[in-house]
Image: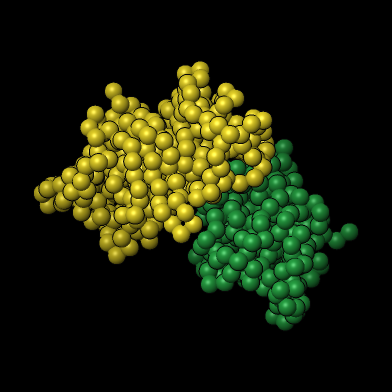
C-alpha cells in the first residue's frame, strides 16, 4: 500500500548552509511520527515544508503519491483541506477580530460554500468531543484561555476531516494538565478518523508518549528511530 | 529567618462579571537562603501574588492581608516608600523577556540604566555591566552589551532580564515564569543559572512557574496554587514525590514522564467559585458532602487544603 505521506531526500537552505538535508521518511494513515530537535534545529521549517507552506531546496514531498511542489496553486488548493497544521501559539492562529464561531466555521464555509450557521450546527458534536461549551463560541479569542483556544483550533482543523495533521508544538505554551488533556483528545480523534500525524516537539517525554517512531534533527543528519531506540537516546542525552 | 512572610493575602478585582478573587487567604513564607517555588496553572493567581509583593497591581485591585519583608510590613506602605525597596531589596525577573526589554536600547545600556539610578559612577557602570554579564555565563559580555535585544536568543534574553534584576544587588528575587516556552536544554541552563545566583549574593528566590519539571529541579520549598488558593505547601521533595492533595497528585500524573494521565474538567472561573471545595468536581476521590470549604491543615510536616487528608 502506498504511504499517505512520503518524504524523499528533502533539504532546505536559506542561502547560508543547510537547515536540514537528506530527510526521508514515510507516514501511513493512523500513524504518528515525531520530529524531535532543540530550538533552531529546523523542525518547524521541516513541518512547514511538508504542508507546502515553505518551498524546499531539493527533494520531494509526496502526498498520496502526488508531488506537492509540481502541482499548480489551483490543484494544491484542492488538496489543502486534507492536510492541516496545528500551530504552537494558539492565540496567534485565530483572527483576533473574529468571534470563535466565525473562525471555526470558516474552513467548511469556504471549502464547501455553506452557510456558517449550518456548519456550526454540524460542528456541535465535535465541540462537545473536545470538551468546550458551545456558548463559549460567541467570544473573541482574547476572552479565552490558551487551552480553550487550542481546543477550538482542533474543532476548526478536524471539521475538515483531514488525512494528515502537522502538529507544531501544540502544547508548549499550555499548562501540564491541559497538555495531557489536549494530547488525550488528539489521540482519540486520531483513532476515530484514522488520521496520520506528524508531531513536532522538543520534549522527549511527550515524544515517547505520543509517537510510533521519531525522527531526530540535530544538525548532523536526520535519523529515524523506533520508540525504544529513542528512549535509549534520551537516556544518554540527559546525562 | 523568614525574609518574606505572606499571610492572609487576598486580591480581588471588580469586573462586570462580578468580583474576581484572584488570590484568597494565601499564607506562605520564604526563608533566607531558600528557593521557594509557587506552581500553578494559568489563572490560578500566581502572578498576582508576585505583583502584590512588588506593589505592581493595577489601581482597581482590592488587596488585604499582610506581607512582611525582613520583619517589616510592606503591603500597606505607600508606593513612594516602596519604590525605595523595589529593585534595591526586592527585584523582579518579569514573565516575558522579549516584551520586557527595550527594543531600541543596547543590552548593556539596559543594565547600566539601573546602575545609574543606584548612583554608580559612569566609569564603574561599564565594568559592572560586563561583570554581571559574565557572571550570567555570557561567553562574550562586551559583544552582548553592544547588541540589541532582537539579536539575542530567547534564553539569552532571559539571562539579560535576570541581569537587569540583579544589577542593584537585591536580597530577594522574584522570578515570574522564567522557562516559558523553553526547550529542555535551555531549561536546564536556566536551572543552573538560578542555582548559581547564590554565588552572586542572591540567596532568596521566590519563583512563580507553571512548569512542574522545572520546579522539581530547583525548589527547596514548594506551594501549589489552585483557583487563587494554596492547596499544598511544604518541602519540595515531599510535595512532588508524595503529593497529598488530589490536585497535586493529578498534576504529577499529567507529566509526560509519568504517562500523561489527564485530569478531567477545567478549573472554575475565578468570578464564579463554588461554595465548598473548588476542586470537588474534578477530584478523583471526592467527599460526599461539598458544603464546607476546606482549610489549610498541617499534615506530615506540610500544609494541605483538603477535608480528606
Q: Which quadrant holds residue B279?
A: top right
Q: Which quadrant holds residue B244?
A: top right
- Quadrant position of the N terminus of chain B in the picture: top left
- Where residue A88 appears, x then y in whole percent? 57, 57
Tag count: 0
Relative to the observer, which residue lies in front, B279 or A236? B279
Chain B visual colour: yellow
Q: Is residue B201 above or below residue B152?
A: above
Q: Which quadrant holds residue A28?
A: bottom right
Chain A visual colour: green
- Where residue A116 appears, x then y in whole percent? 70, 75
Q: Is residue B283 visible?
A: yes
Q: Is residue A42 visible?
A: no
- Quadrant position of the C terminus of chain B in the picture: top right
Along the horizontal axis of the image, is A111 left or right of B171? right
- Where residue A20 appears, x then y in whole percent? 60, 58
Along the horizontal axis of the image, is A237 left or right of B195? right
Residue at x-position 76% and y-position 50%: A188
Residue at x-position 64% and y-position 31%: B289
- Where residue A60 appears, x then y in whole percent? 72, 67
Q: Residue furthest right?
A: A1
Relative to the observer, which residue lies in front, A236 or A128? A128
Q: Is residue B147 above or below residue A236?
A: below
Relative to the observer, which residue lies in front, B240 or B112? B240
Amino acid at each position: 500500500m502506498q504511504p499517505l505521506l512520503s518524504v524523499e531526500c528533502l533539504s532546505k537552505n536559506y542561502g547560508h548552509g543547510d537547515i536540514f538535508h537528506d530527510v526521508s521518511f514515510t507516514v501511513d494513515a493512523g500513524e504518528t511520527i515525531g520530529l524531535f530537535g532543540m530550538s533552531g534545529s529546523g523542525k518547524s521549517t521541516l513541518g512547514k515544508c511538508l504542508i507546502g507552506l515553505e518551498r524546499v531546496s531539493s527533494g520531494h514531498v509526496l502526498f498520496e503519491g502526488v508531488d506537492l511542489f509540481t502541482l499548480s496553486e489551483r490543484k494544491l488548493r484542492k488538496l489543502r483541506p486534507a492536510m492541516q497544521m496545528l500551530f504552537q501559539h494558539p492565540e496567534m492562529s485565530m483572527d483576533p477580530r473574529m468571534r470563535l464561531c466565525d473562525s471555526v466555521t470558516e474552513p467548511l464555509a469556504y471549502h464547501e460554500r455553506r452557510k456558517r450557521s449550518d456548519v456550526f450546527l454540524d460542528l456541535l458534536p465535535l465541540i462537545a468531543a473536545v470538551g468546550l461549551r458551545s456558548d463559549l463560541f460567541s467570544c473573541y479569542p482574547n476572552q479565552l484561555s490558551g487551552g480553550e483556544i487550542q481546543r477550538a483550533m482542533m474543532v476548526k482543523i478536524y471539521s475538515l476531516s483531514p488525512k494528515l495533521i502537522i502538529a507544531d508544538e501544540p502544547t508548549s505554551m499550555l499548562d501540564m494538565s491541559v497538555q495531557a488533556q489536549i494530547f488525550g483528545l488528539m489521540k482519540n480523534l486520531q483513532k476515530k478518523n484514522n488520521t496520520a500525524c506528524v508531531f513536532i516537539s522538543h520534549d522527549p517525554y511527550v515524544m515517547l508518549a505520543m509517537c510510533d517512531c521519531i525522527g531526530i534533527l540535530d544538525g548532523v543528519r536526520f535519523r529515524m528511530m523506533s520508540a525504544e531506540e529513542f528512549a535509549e537516546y534520551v537516556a544518554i542525552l540527559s546525562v | 529567618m523568614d525574609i518574606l512572610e505572606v499571610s492572609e493575602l487576598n486580591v480581588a478585582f471588580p469586573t462586570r462579571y462580578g468580583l474576581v478573587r484572584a488570590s484568597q487567604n494565601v499564607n506562605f513564607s520564604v526563608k533566607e537562603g531558600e528557593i521557594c517555588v509557587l506552581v500553578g496553572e494559568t489563572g490560578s493567581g500566581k502572578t498576582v501574588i508576585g505583583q502584590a509583593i512588588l506593589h505592581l497591581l493595577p489601581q482597581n485591585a482590592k488587596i488585604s492581608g499582610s506581607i512582611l519583608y525582613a520583619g517589616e510590613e510592606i503591603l500597606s506602605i505607600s508606593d513612594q516608600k516602596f519604590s525605595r525597596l523595589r529593585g534595591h531589596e526586592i527585584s523582579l525577573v518579569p514573565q516575558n523577556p522579549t516584551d520586557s526589554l527595550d527594543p531600541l536600547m543596547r543590552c548593556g545600556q539596559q543594565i547600566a540604566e539601573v546602575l545609574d539610578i543606584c548612583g554608580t559612577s559612569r566609569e564603574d557602570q561599564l565594568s559592572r555591566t560586563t561583570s554581571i554579564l559574565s557572571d550570567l555565563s555570557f561567553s562574550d559580555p562586551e559583544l552582548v552589551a553592544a547588541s540589541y535585544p532582537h539579536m539575542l536568543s530567547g534564553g539569552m534574553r532571559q539571562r539579560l532580564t535576570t541581569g537587569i534584576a540583579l544589577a542593584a544587588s537585591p536580597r530577594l528575587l522574584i522570578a515570574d515564569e522564567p522557562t516559558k516556552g523553553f526547550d529542555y536544554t535551555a531549561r536546564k541552563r536556566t536551572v543552573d543559572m538560578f542555582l548559581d545566583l547564590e554565588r552572586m549574593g542572591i540567596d532568596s528566590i521566590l519563583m512563580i512557574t507553571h512548569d512542574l519539571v522545572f520546579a522539581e529541579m530547583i525548589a527547596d520549598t514548594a506551594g501549589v496554587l489552585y483557583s487563587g488558593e494554596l492547596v499544598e505547601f511544604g518541602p519540595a521533595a515531599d510535595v512532588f514525590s508524595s503529593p497529598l492533595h488530589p490536585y497535586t497528585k493529578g498534576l504529577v500524573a499529567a507529566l509526560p514522564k509519568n504517562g500523561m494521565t489527564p485530569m478531567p474538567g477545567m478549573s472554575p472561573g475565578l468570578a464564579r467559585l463554588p461554595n465548598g471545595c473548588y476542586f470537588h468536581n474534578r477530584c478523583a476521590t471526592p467527599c460526599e458532602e461539598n458544603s464546607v470549604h476546606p482549610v489549610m491543615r498541617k499534615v506530615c510536616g506540610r500544609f494541605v487544603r483538603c477535608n480528606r487528608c
